[in-house]
Amino acid sequence: MPTLEDVYRFLLTPRWLALHVVVLLVIPAFVLLGQWQFGRFEERSTSSHQITGNLGAAPVAVEKLTSPGGTVSTQDKYRTVTAKGTYDANVQLLVRRRVQDKAVGFYVLTPLITANGTGVLVNRGWVKAGSTADAHPEVPAPSSGEVTVTGRLRPSETEETSGIRDRAGLPAGQVLLINTEAIGRRLPYKLLGGYVELTGQSPAAATAPAPVPAPDVGEGGGLNLAYGVQWWLFIGVAIGGWALLIRREAADLKAATATGGPDPDPDPGEPAAHDKPGSTVTR
């Protein structure tokens, strides 16, 4: 009658030792991947709630949230702001490679000069690209006279935050990034940090670029939560599969021993029965 030690001796063979190592490596990897997804869920959920709150908050003057040469904090991103002044159409810029409605075009960026002489960049909206890459698109002129604009406050763009690589040699009046610091060097007045994504204007413009859609808040990281649960379920699958293989192998060994058959998975280092010391070989 085989002992328990005899039945499970196969667990120490090289093939099974390799399987043990794989399982022991996979389990902590799945734990870490699940924790990372749960962390992303928390981060995106917090961001989603914050953006939703900022979009629904009452408008405030843009000067209350940013200053000349300053920056826009993460907490104020997409906050609804207002600004009063006149557009400086002479230094209007086009922001290249902006996609809207599945078409490539430009954002129309026009400084608004306020009563105290400072400026704030206003993204007036999107226009479709011309027939060629260097063709100048049709751009509605900004309103003349004093206007009050309402929009979403956005931080300046950088290569790191936007994923867009800046480069020189662009056509005159065009940029790749809405970077307040870089654009401000060209202007004779100071710019407030960040820019305003236009959502409304009073008095309304006769013609205007297509408005930029509101940000897609999404499901607040719901997919990350699902992926986190999925990775942790994989831990159970790995352990369950490992245990199932062990039980199946042990059952096969018991069955082979009971019927007097050969060991289905002998230890490669174990000598055969007829080679063991003291064994009798019948010829």
Image (cartoon, rainbow, N blue to C red):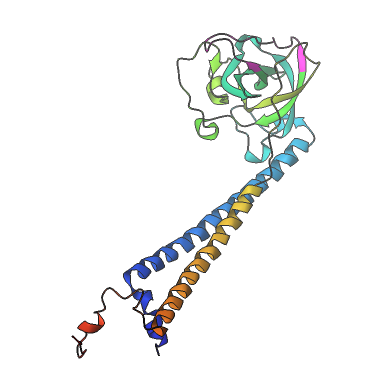
Q: Residue at x 54, y 53 (%)?
A: 36
Splitting the image into 4 quarters, where does residue 253 fall? Answer: bottom left
Magenta-drawn stretch contains 15: no
User: Of helix, strand and loop, which mostly describes the magenta segment?
Assistant: loop
Query: In this view, which residue lies farthest toward the front?
Result: 283
**Residue at the image position 37 percent from the left and 70 percent from the top:** 16
Residue at (43% x, 74% y) in the render:
249
88 or 16: nearer the viewer: 16
The residue located at (63%, 15%) in the rendering is 128
Closer to us: 25 or 49: 25
The answer, for residue 117, to whether it is visible in the render is no
In the rendered structure, which segment of residues is drawn in magenta?
127-147
Seen from the viewer's position, the closer of residues 219 and 12 is 12
On the image, the x and y values in percent for residue 69 come to 58, 28
Q: Position of residue 220 (x, y in %)?
A: 68, 46
Asked whether residue 127 is in view, the answer is: yes
Estimate the x, y position of residue 72 in percent, counting from the top left.
63, 34
Classify 163 as above or below 236. above
